[in-house]
Amino acid sequence: MDASAVVELRRARRHRRLQKLDVSEALYRGYLTAIAVGIGIWALSNLPADRRLGLRQVAAVVQHGPELVGALVAAVVALSIRSGARGGPLLLEAPDIQHVLLAPVPRGRALRVPALQRVRAAVLGWTAVGAVAGLLAAKRLPGSAVEWLATGAAAGALTGAAAVGAALVVSGRRIRPGWASLAALALAGWAVADALLGVQSSPFSLVGRIALYPVAGGVRAWLVAVPILALVGLGIASAGGVSLEAAMRRASLVGQLRFALTVRDLRTVVVLARLLAEERPRRRPLVRLKPGSGQLVAVWKRDWQGLLRWPVSRFVRVLVLGAVAGAALRGVWAGTTPLLAVAGVALWLMAMDADVGLAGEADHSDRTRTVPVDEGTLLLRHLPAGVAAVALAAAVGGFAGAQVGGWSLRAVALGAVVLVPAAIAAVAAAAVSTLRSVYGSGSLLAFSPESTGLGLVIREGLPPAIAMTGVVTVWAAHHFARHPSEELSVAVSWFWLPLTVTVFVTLWISHRGIR
């Protein structure tokens, strides 16, 4: 078998796949996705009507912005390096592994096309993310929207290229997970040191300078594209060294993951993602708790035993998400309303990790019916532990993230006030996502066949929207307080929104026991 035979096999498989593809269904899904994303971007960028930054605020962005953006880029690259140590980033199919990679054909030549496709997908995806970020930045920073779109897209493309290139090198060179984790930690630490010291010594800080080029300038920053492109070339050249065992395991899990996404089973997606990341719980908890005597105490301690079995990577991920939520809320308090979506999604993802008790009960719903407690009541008893865990992680990580704009006692006080409502709303959103995957959500949103598409959009966007209600109080404190001394009272007056939503979610969960 030679390289031309491999090309013919892939061409024939693509032809058969296209024959089975329902073009109208694919267009319909793309149509719904485009509408939902377009409406979301338009609403976030236009409805709030945020004011442009003043000269002093723009100077602060120029001084600290590139390093902070660089820290985010470094985090993306670090995660990609860890993925490469586990067999990523290539998504090979089982027939390719069994018949093509085991055939007498150079693996580098056989994997060149999949590697190029993976690079293209990563670069295009991150280019879109950067363009959206540039569009939102143009609403508050000086410069034309075209400039921000172009520089945001360029920074996104460089981020995607650096991430996929690093993952391909680690995977192709078969660098051990321990060494890969050390490299990822070193790169992330380098970028964080730049942010703390206010210098731009890492290439990630230069990517951040490109992202803020309309206000930060710096033509030399564009030279960072040269080592990134060289890294991508080295990654493509190293693709042939991928481990077949890791590729086969990844192919099996990714196939199941795609099916779970097709049927929108979010709970299964979370479980498979943890398996893909090789996140295994500890055999023994960090602290062994004594069994509880009452029903409420027993459920509480059981949930905390599950939380204390987390691997280190999950602790780190939750704290990082807390830092992201804290930094985003600091930006909302400073007047950048679109960051509400970032904070809401970060808290929702934190709660998806922290809600281990409820998720375990949902995974074994047959066992739930064997205990002398109403099913809905038992599910509700798992929520307090999740709220406490999210509040604790958000307090630790959020305090660190909120220092992005500098120390402020008012910001700390406002964060302490909204901490509990934000944790309650996030856990409610996670509960909806988890239980809906197991019990379903009914057909309340499908009033007619024509409304099915709208129902699907609302169904997928409902959990993040619920999580956002917990942090909308920060936005209200900024926009409706006439004086800084009134911010806390305004935030408290908006607690009715997350609490009302949580009541409805609680009623929906309790209904699980009387189905």
Image: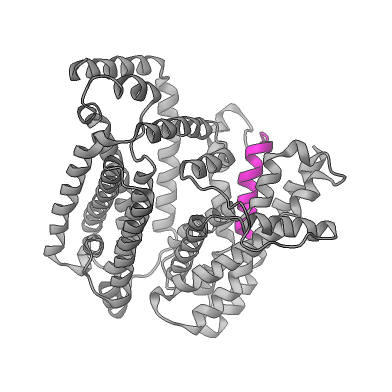
Provide residue 73's location: percent of width, then percent of height.
31, 58
Q: Quadrant of residue 339?
A: bottom left
Which residue is drawn at the image coordinates 39% and 73% (left, top)? 404
The image shows residue 461 at horizontal and vertical percentages of 53, 46
Residue 267 appearing in the image: yes
Answer whether residue 428 is magenta in the image: yes
The correct choice, above or below, for 438 with respect to 397 in the image is above
Is 421 left or right of 302, judged from the image as shown? left
Q: Nearer the viewer, residue 408 or 494?
A: 408
Quarter containing the C terminus: top right
Where residue 47 sits: x, y (%)?
44, 58
Q: Is residue 500 visible?
A: no
Q: Residue 299, position in %: x, y?
A: 76, 55
Q: Residue at x 53, y 78 (%)?
A: 481
Model colouring: one colour
Q: Residue at x 44, y 54 (%)?
A: 43
Q: Which residues, given as a range, are shown in magenta?
A: 425-444
Q: Is residue 486 left or right of residue 14?
A: right
- Indicate whether residue 165 is drawn in magenta: no
224 horizontally vs 100: left or right: left
- Classify residue 417 by image quadrant: bottom right
